[in-house]
Amino acid sequence: MPYFNEITIAAILIAGVLLYLIRPKHKEKKLMLISKYRRVRSKSLMLQDLLSSHILQNDSDSEDLRPGVTYGEFMRELKKMHSYYLSEKTYIKLKNSNNIFFLKKTDRILDEQEDQLNDIEKELLVIAS
């Protein structure tokens, strides 16, 4: 194995060049994901405000929103979802992370949260009308 050192150095250089070329695309995706996170987070907070004001104006904390679910229970579930998936701690972790797998997982979770929030928004807009 007379060329082992040269092969190792060449492999490291090739890996470095590939990582250098991939990095700008990765940065763009990360910035888009952070933007998406902020959008979903603000939507969650807006829906919490909307539901909270409806509960306070109509004193409907213990009234049924759906069969078996009260407004208060729904509000607590919405807050729990927000604190688990859209907290400031998660935002900081996302902002500081360069782990591709974590970013993909977070993107998938944000898609799910956005879909759920869209459904909730439709439901609350019907109630608010």
Image: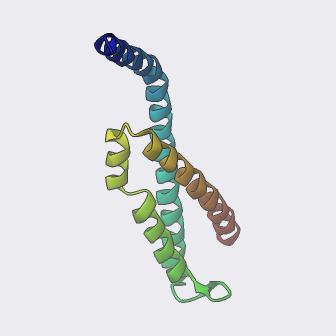
Compared to 105, does 73 lie above or below?
A: below
Q: Quadrant of the C terminus?
A: bottom right
Name the side, left or right, on which 8 lies relative to 128: left
Compared to 121, does 102 lie above or below?
A: above
Image spot of residue 64 (x, y percent):
62, 87
Q: Residue at x 50, y 69 (%)?
A: 78
Name the side, left or right, on which 85 lies relative to 112: left
Q: Residue at x 46, y 28 (%)?
A: 26
Residue nearer the viewer, 108 or 41: 108
Q: For the view shown, which residue lies furthest in the left direction?
A: 5
Specify the quadrant of the image occupied by residue 95: top left
Residue nearer the viewer, 7 or 106: 7
Name the side, left or right, on which 108 lies relative to 23: right
Residue 128 visible to an observer of this rendering: yes
Q: For the view shown, which residue lies furthest in the front direction?
A: 1
Q: Residue at x 69, y 62 (%)?
A: 122
Residue 57 visible to an observer of this rendering: no
Image spot of residue 49 (x, y percent):
48, 64
Tally of marks: 0
